[in-house]
Amino acid sequence: MRIFLLLTLFLLGGCQADVRPPATLFDYQLHSPTGQPLSLSRAARQLDSADVIMVGELHGHPGIHRFQAELLARLLSQPRPLALAMEQFSRDHQATLNAYLAGKLGEDAFIEQSNAWPGYRSDYRPLVELARQAQIPVLAANAPRHLVRCIARKGPTYLDQLPADQRAWVAEQLTLSDDAYKARFMANRHHGQAPTEFQFAAQTSWDDTMAESIDRYLQSHPRHRVLLTVGRFHIGDGLGTARRLQQRAPGLKVALIYPVTTDEATPAAPLWSLKVGALPAARLDQEPLPSFSLGEPDC
C-alpha cells in the first residue's frame, strides 16, 4: 500500500510547480489564509491539524479536480486516518458506493446504480480510485436530488410524510432561520427569478445533510479527519455546509479551500484561496440562456 501511495504522489505532481500562477486550465496556485503561496507538500503539512478540510469547486474545472486528487494523495501519506466525503453522491446510494469500493461492482454498473454525476469519469474517478486503493471510507454525504426537488416544490413539511428509511436520507434538522447564508442565497437570481422560501429550504437541505453526514462520521470515528468535495457556493464566506457543521460540532477545526479564477477577488481569511484559470465563456452576451427544466418531481 505504501508503494502505491508513493507512486501516486510522484505521478500526481511531486514537483513544486503549484507555487506558480496557473498557466493552463490544469494548473492551480494555492494560497494560505494569510495570502502566502504554498506548494502542495507545505499546504498538506499546515492542514495536518484540521479535522475537516472542505475543498470547494467550480464543477467541471480540470485544475480544481486535479488539485482535489493531488491533495487527497498527499493526505493519504500522512498517519492520521482519513475519510473522503462527497457532495456528488447521495445517502440513498451509500450501499452501491460501498459495493464498488469492495470490488463487488464494475465501474459501469457503479456509475449507473449510484446515479453518478455526468462528469464522473473525468472529474471524480481519480478521487474514488485513490480511496478504493487506500481502502478508506467514502461518504455519500448529500441528500437525494429527487427529495430536494420535492422540498423546493412543497416545502420542508414534505419530509414529514416520508417513510422512515427515506426520511433518513435528509438531515434530521434543517436550518431555516434568517441567517447570513439565507440572505446570500436569496440575493441570487436563477434565470432571472428570485428564490422562494421553499427553494431555500431545498438548498439548505443539501448543506445540513452534508454537515450531518460528516458530524455523524466523526462522532463514531473521533480520531479520523474528513476531506469533503463540494461546490464552492456551499462554503463561500464560511457559510453553508461549513457553518452548518460548526453549529453541530463547534469544537471541530475546519479548513476551507475556496477556488477563484484569476480574474476574481481572493476570498478573505480564514478561507484558503485556490487560484485557477478562467473557463471559456459558456455563451456570449447576445446568446440566449439555455432552456431549463427539471420536470415535475414525483412527490
Image: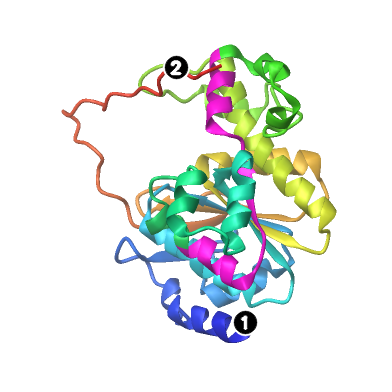
Which of the two residues, 120 or 52, is positioned nearer the viewer here? 120
Residue 151 against residue 41 in the figure, above or below:
above
Residue 151 on the magenta span: yes
Image quadrant holding the C terminus, namely top right
Q: Is residue 244 above or below residue 47?
A: above
Q: In x, y percent, where is residue 48?
A: 70, 69
Residue that carries the numbered disc 1 in the rendered image: 1
Kindly indicate whether the residue at mark 1 contacts the one at mark 2 (C-beta within 8 angstroms): no
- Toward the bottom, the furthest residue is 3
Q: Secondary structure at mark 1?
A: loop
Locate residue 99, reporting x and y percent. 60, 56
Q: Amino acid at mark 2?
A: Glu
Relative horizontal placement of residue 184, taking residue 120 as reference (left or right): right
| Horizontal arrangement in the rendering, residue 262 relative to residue 281 (left or right) | right
The magenta stretch spans which residues?
A: 126-153
Dividing the picture into quadrants, the one containing residue 143 is: top right
The quarter of the image holding the N terminus is bottom right
Task: Classify mark 2: residues with Cα within 10 Å, few (<14), some (14-19) or many (20+).
Answer: few
Residue 182 belongs to magenta span: no
Please tell me which residue is depicted at 67% across the width and 26% down the height of the picture: 179
Task: Answer yes or no: is residue 218 visible.
Answer: yes
Residue drawn at x 21%, y 25% as measured from the top left? 288
Q: CA distance from mark 2 to mark 1?
A: 47 Å
Question: Which amino acid type is marked by label 1?
Answer: Met
In this view, 73 is above or below 146: below
Bin the neighbour count of mark 1 within 10 Å (Cα to Cα): few under 14, some 14-19, many 20 and up: few
Query: For the view shown, which residue lies furthest in the left direction?
Result: 286
Query: Which residue does the image show at 50% across and 84% down from the upper left?
Result: 7
By secondary structure, the bulk of the magenta-drawn segment is best described as helix
Q: Position of residue 268 (x, y in %)?
A: 57, 49
According to the image, label 2 marks what residue?
A: 296
254 vs 30, left or right, is right
